Each structure stands twice: as C-alpha cells, then as structure tokens.
Amino acid sequence: MSEASTTKRAEELRRNLQSVRGRMAAACARAGRREDEVLLVAVSKFHPASDILAVAAAGQRHFGESYAQEALAKQDELSGQDILWHFIGGLQTKKAKQVTGRFALIHSLDSEKLARELFKRSKDARVLQPVLIEVNLGEEQKAGVEEHDLIALAEVTLSLKERGLGLDLRGLMCLPPKFDSPEEARPAFAYLRELRDDLAGRLGAPLPELSMGMTGDFEAAIEEGATIVRVGTSIFGPRPVK
C-alpha cells in the first residue's frame, strides 16, 4: 500500500472511530449514564495489523479477536504497543493454553470443562485470568451456556481461584439473535442484565460486566446496561474475504 493510501486509510479509520464514540456518548446520555461506564472493544478479526495500529494511534486501546492463531500472530506483530486484547470468539478447550494470560478478558467461557482447563493453564502461567460467561439466549446455532446451567457454571468458575491465581469471573456476555432492527434485540439485552443481577444476588459476588451489543445494535445495548460493546464493521468496514 502506498504512503498516500496508508494515510487515507488511517484517516478513514479515525473518522469511523470518532463516529462510533459519538454514538456511544449519545446513547449514554439517553440512558442517563456516564460515558466512562461503557468500554469499546474494536473487533479487528480478519483485519490487518496495520489497521489496528492506525486505530490505536487514534486513541483506541481495547481490541477483540475471535481466532487464537490470528490473534496471537497480531499480538506478536504489535508487541510493545499499548493494546489490551479481548478474546471474543468461541474457545475450544484445546486452545485454552494458547490464550490464557494473553488476553485482558476472555468473553466466551461456556462450559465447566473449559473453565477447569483455563484454571489449570492460569495456575501454570501464574496469572489471574478475567473471564465472562457466555449465555445462550435461545439460538440453537449459537455458543454459550444454557440459562438453566448458568448458576452451576458460575459457582464452579468462582471456585476456581487459588492464592490469587486462576479465574476471575467478571460478568456475562451474549450474542443475541440477528434482527432487522436494533429495537428487536433490546429485550435480549434487558434479559441478560436481569440474569446478571439475579446471579450476582444469588452468589453474593460482584459481577460488574455485561458484554453485549455489536455494530448493528450497540446503542440499544448501552441503553439496556451494557458495560462493554464489541464493534467491528462500523470502525473497520466490511471484513476482508478470507
């Protein structure tokens, strides 16, 4: 890519990021929330490290990736940059060793088997690994723990901590069904908030984070209590064809 093209792309990404942050601020204002209550994770999967670098230069620090191999390669390429990485995709148990300790937050814990493997790897790496439990809100094709198994998984996850090492359960995440209108997703966001509040009360544990809302519906998610939104297309544009 020529220098002119690189400069043009960086400016496009800066404008996109500014637009998303403006929309987030407006949603916070409508909901009577402070802007610093909601964290933006820029979803950079399939986009090159050069794009991540440009968005980081525009002030974005948190980036989300869905595939371990791709994410770790980008981490190595961008080593030394002030970037915090989030793992937001489905996580196979066999990949737990690769991601533990490499991500500020794993959003997709969905089984006791995975929790125990992450715990084992966290102890080996001498880290406390923050995690969210991904909840399946009724879609057969989506990952996530079923609602009726949520309390049991949360109890197990909370127990998987020894001497400051292991897992740090921070809250819940969801991928709601895709709708034509963001308003149609709003009930799912409200329901996840209610699940989180009920779970925190039952367990007597602070669960401050709600990771919900993407490019098509993040404003509704913020209005319903999201503390983390995962936005890709509105920042980076359509994903490149693999």
Image (cartoon, rainbow, N blue to C red):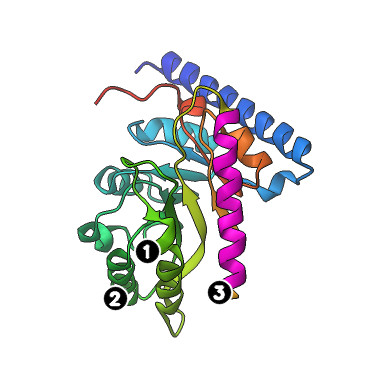
User: SS class of the residue under badge 2?
Assistant: helix
Alpha-carbon span between mark 3 and mark 1: 26 Å
Q: Position of residue 39 (x, y in %)?
A: 60, 46
Is disc 3 surrounded by few (<14), some (14 to 19) or many (20+) residues within 10 Å? Answer: few
User: SS class of the residue under badge 1?
Assistant: loop
Q: Quadrant of residue 116?
A: bottom left
Q: Answer left or right for 112 relative to 133.
A: left
**Which amino acid, mark 1?**
Gly
Q: Which dot, 3 or 1, sits closer to the camera? A: 3
Where is mark 3, residue-wise? 203
Labelled pair 2, 1 in contact (Cβ < 8 Å): no
Q: Position of residue 171 (x, y in %)?
A: 53, 60
The numbered dot on residue 101 is 1
Q: In the rendered view, would you say 92 is above or below 3? A: below
**Nearer-N-terminus badge (3/2):** 2
| Part of the protein shown in magenta | 183-202
Q: Is residue 218 magenta?
A: no
Which residue is located at x 42 percent, y 15 percent? 5
